Amino acid sequence: MPLEEARSLLKVAERDWEILLVLKDAPRVHLSGVAFHAQQLIEKSLKAVLAQADLPFDRTHDLIRLATTLTAAGHQLPLSLDELARLNPYAAVFRYDDTDIEILTRDEAVSCARRIRAWATQVVTNQEEKRDQP
């Protein structure tokens, strides 16, 4: 059931996308809230591609670890490891820390999320189409 798990993960990632769109321009929302949802969308999208490829993955928030597994399996991601590394701390560290370190902008967080969302959707959709061909 790898494809079903992949679709489920993309569906949940879509919730983060919708939240991200609402929060991205809200001046009262701290960058960490915006970046958290971008990070979550990216994490779920990477896991969706891992699932559809039937590749094992841990319960982790580490985007670098997930991306490394995908690239080792031959996938070319639309984000660099540097971009992913800049989003990694927003999974937990910056949500529980009052330090105001901006390592990316709102626009960068949204751009990263947008690119991974489109890529993961295409990868999973292509796999569905291959499965459905006679």
Image (cartoon, rainbow, N blue to C red):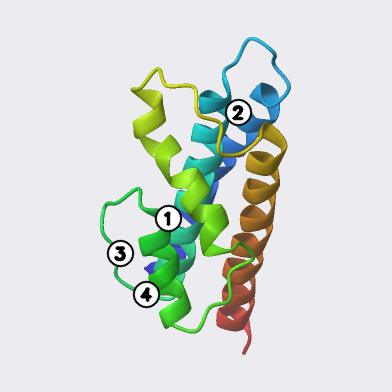
Locate residue 110 relative to residue 36 in the image: left or right.
right
Residue at point 30%, 64% (across, down): 57
* Residue 12 appears in the figure: no
- Residues at marks 3 and 1, CA–CA distance in whole angstroms: 11 Å
Q: Amino acid at mark 4?
A: Asp
Residue 77 placed where, x, y %? Answer: 58, 69
The N terminus sits in image quarter: bottom left
CA separation in Å, label 1 and label 2 = 20 Å
Sequence order check: which comes first, mark 1 or mark 2? 2
What residue is shown with label 1? 63
Mark closer to the observer (1, 2): 1
Q: Position of residue 81 (x, y in %)?
A: 51, 62
Question: At label 3, which amino acid type do we have?
Answer: Phe
Q: Secondary structure at mark 4?
A: loop
Determine whether label 2 and label 3 are within 8 Å by CB: no
Mark 1 surroundings within 10 Å by alpha-carbon count, few (fewer than 14), some (14 through 19), many (20 or more)? many
**Which residue lies under the disc numbered 3?**
57
Q: Using a 10 Å C-alpha cutoff, classify the residue at mark 3 as few (fewer than 14 neighbours), some (14 to 19) or many (20 or more).
A: some
Q: Which quadrant would residue 107 be assigned to in this image?
A: top right
Q: Mark 1 or mark 4, which is nearer the start of the sequence?
A: 4
| Lower sequence index among marks 4 and 2 | 2
Gap between marks 2 and 3 measured at Cα: 25 Å
Q: SS for tag 1? A: helix
Could you say which disc has been placed on residue 19 in the image?
Answer: 2
* Image depth: mark 4 or mark 3 in front: 3
Q: CA distance from mark 4 to mark 2?
A: 29 Å
Please determine whether, in this image, residue 91 is positioned above or below residue 86.
above
Judge the density around disc 4: few (<14), some (14-19), many (≥20) Cα neighbours within 10 Å. some
Disc 1 marks a residue whose amino acid type is Leu
Q: Quadrant of the C terminus?
A: bottom right
- The residue identified by callout 4 is 54
